[in-house]
Image (tube, rainbow, N blue to C red):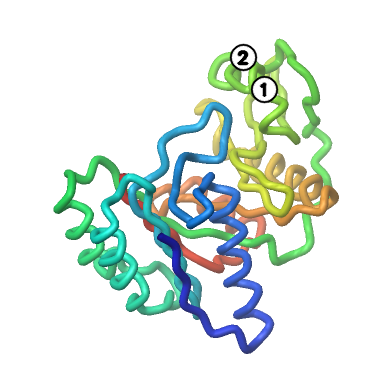
Amino acid sequence: MLGATSLLHDPLTSDSAQLLRLDVEALFRSTPEGRLIESNETPPAAAPRVFVGRTATSVEWRVRRDVPDGVAAEIGRLAADLPHLPNGIGDAAVYAAIEAVAAGVAPIAERSHGPAFVFAQAPLAPHPDVIEIREDSALLAGQFAVLRRELEYVAPLFAVVRDGAVVSACFCARRTDAAAEAGVSTHPDHRGRGHAAAVVNAWRVAIERSGRTPIYSTSYDNASSRAVARRLGLRQYAETFSLA
C-alpha cells in the first residue's frame, strides 16, 4: 500500500512533495502497487515494515509487502491523518498510533527518525584535498574497504586521503536515474576537520551534473551528520520515520 496527501499550490510545496517521492523511490525497491520489497542498494537489505515521510504540506507512507492487508490499511489511514511537518524537529509521538498497530503484528526491532535535506544553496568552492576514486584502489582500506567491491553501485565516490588511505568519503548510498542519497563515512581519528563537508560538497556537484537530485538524510540524534548539513547550508524539507 502506498499513499500521499498533499497541497500542491505553490512551487515550494510542490518541490518538497516531489522531492520526498524521489527520495522514497531512491531508498527502496517496491512492487507495482507500492509495497516495499527491499532497500535499493547492492546487496539489498530488508525494507522497513513501515515508512512515513512528512513535509510542511504533504505526507507519504509505505508498508512492506508482507504486512497483512488489514494492518496496512489501518496504517495508511493513520498516516493520512498525520499533521504536516512543523518547523524544526518533528515530535516522534505523532507516530505512536502507527507504531502500536505495527507492534500488534510483531515486536518493533528498530525505529529510525530523522531529517531529510535538500541542497538549497550554491556549492562551496572545491576543496583541493578531495579526489574522485573511479576504480578499485588500495586507498580504500579499513572501514572503507567494502566500497572497493561496490564502486559500480556507489559511484561517484569522493574522498580525502591522508598517509595513503581514505579518511573520509561520500558516495551514493542509494540512487536512481532521478535522485541520489548521500552516504558519508569518516574515520574517527579524522572527524571534526571539515572533511565530511568537503566530500559531500564534491559529491553534490557531480550528482547535479549527472542530472540527478542530490538528497542528504540522517537521524535527529546524529549530531555530527547534522553539523555537516549546517556547514553546507542544507535546507530540511522533510522528515522520515520508519519501523523494522
Extreme top residue here? 138
Say which residue appears at 36% left-offset and 50% top-offset: 112
Residues under numbered marks 2 and 1 in contact, where contact means CB atoms less than 8 Å apart: yes
Q: Disc 2 marks which residue?
A: 141
> Left of 125 or right of it: where is 108?
left
Q: Is residue 113 visible?
A: no
Cα separation between marks 2 and 1: 7 Å
Dot 2 lies on which element? loop
The image's mark for residue 192 is none
Q: Nearer the viewer, residue 138 or 64?
A: 64
- Kind of residue at disc 1: Val
Sequence-wise, the earlier of marks 2 and 1 is 2
x%, y% of residue 142? Answer: 56, 15
Residue in the picture at 68% in, 47% down: 176
Spot occupied by residue 184 in the image (x, y as percentages of width and height): 59, 38
Q: Locate the N terminus by quadrant.
A: bottom left
Query: Which residue is the site of mark 1?
Result: 166
Circle 2 Cα neighbour tier, 10 Å, few/some/many (<14 / 14–19 / ≥20): some
Q: Is residue 53 above or below residue 43?
A: below
Which of the 4 image quarters holds residue 140?
Answer: top right
Dot 1: what SS? strand
Q: Which of the image's four quarters has the C terminus? A: top left
Q: Position of residue 31 (x, y in %)?
A: 50, 49
Three-letter code for the amino acid on which mark 2 is drawn = Ala
